[in-house]
Amino acid sequence: MLKTTASRLAAFSAGLALAAGSAAAIGAATATTPPFQDCLKVAAANAGFGTQAMADASHGAPPMIEPVPGSDGLRSQLAGLRLAPLSRTLTAGASTTWRFRIIGCDGNPVRHFDRDNTKLLHLIVVRTDLTGYQHLHPTLGADGTFTIELRTALPGSYRAIAEFVIDGRKYVLGTNLTTPGTVRNIPLPAPALEKSVDGYDVELQRPAQMTAGQESQLTSRITRHGQPINDLEAYLGSYGHLVALHAPEAAYSHVHPISADPGSGAITFNTELSERGTYRLFLQFQTHGRVHTVAFTQAIS
């Protein structure tokens, strides 16, 4: 799926980034060492970025927050960076403290990240049947270790997808985790354009024909008791977040809105889904301090 190029598709900063300086470098403890920066530039250039673009980023030019080519969460290692879990086993029906590191091309844990939409790293965890979706934000320790409490309700194989920005470049890396026990996969719901969550009704408006590799606009319209809501709140710097996961391999894209009307409950996204097939779209929005998540199954030709 989403073998992203430098498009709007995976740009967290596209759309309604409300917090000023959302890509400002805010790391933990010490700054990254020059050897790491040097080898990361080479690796990113080899991954598809021009050397001038990397040079601009290293000399203080405004960061572009472009996705590194190939960043779709299917790889644990990409462009000089590696996602290294300290463990891979979770417990069904309970909370597990899970730790991981992002290892740089110098072999050391990365301790300096750009803050992107108010967070240093966004973590998506989902079972491989695309149930049990979670959007989390681990804590970064001074030694470069991220820590998060993961609660997995059912046994099975889970995909953990980490999205983060370094020097204005977005990286998406993934790894597999296991919750032991008897596995019963849940079939995906049939495609639908209307769903309800927490007392809200959400209608997904899309072109009748969406073609893989072509940009399309998706608009979600949120109502309550038959009336458009007027209390949308900013969540992580935007009025809405949309994650697309391609079945069955859970390849990933995170899309942010190009426009929103918080007074009428409408949020519009630009999307470009690069593979044909079935997708699960997870929309998150916030009202009265509470985040709501609604999922749509969609087919792309």
Image: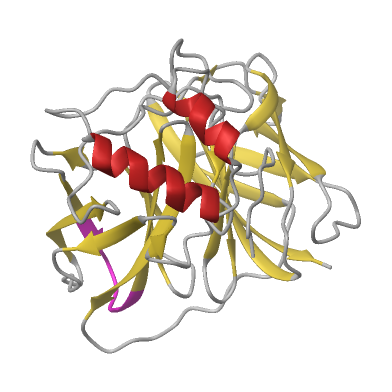
Q: Is residue 288 left or right of residue 145?
A: right
Pick out the residue farthest to the bottom: 182
Seen as rendered, the residue at the extreme top is 20
Magenta residues, as a range?
A: 150-157
- Could you tell me which residue is drawn at 9 percent across and 36 percent down? 142
Q: Is residue 131 left or right of residue 262?
A: left
- Image location of residue 69, percent across then percent down: 58, 54
Residue 268 can be seen in this image: yes
Above or below for 197 versus 224: below
Whole-percent x and y of residue 33?
A: 21, 35
Q: Is residue 140 magenta?
A: no
The residue closer to the viewer here, 46 or 162, is: 46
**Residue 286, x across and y down, in percent:** 47, 28
- Quadrant of image for the C terminus: bottom right
Residue at point 30%, 54% (across, down): 105
Q: Position of residue 206 (x, y in %)?
A: 82, 46
| Quadrant position of the N terminus in the picture | bottom right
Q: Nearer the viewer, residue 271 or 184?
A: 271
Apparent side of residue 147 relative to residue 203 in the rendered image (left or right): left
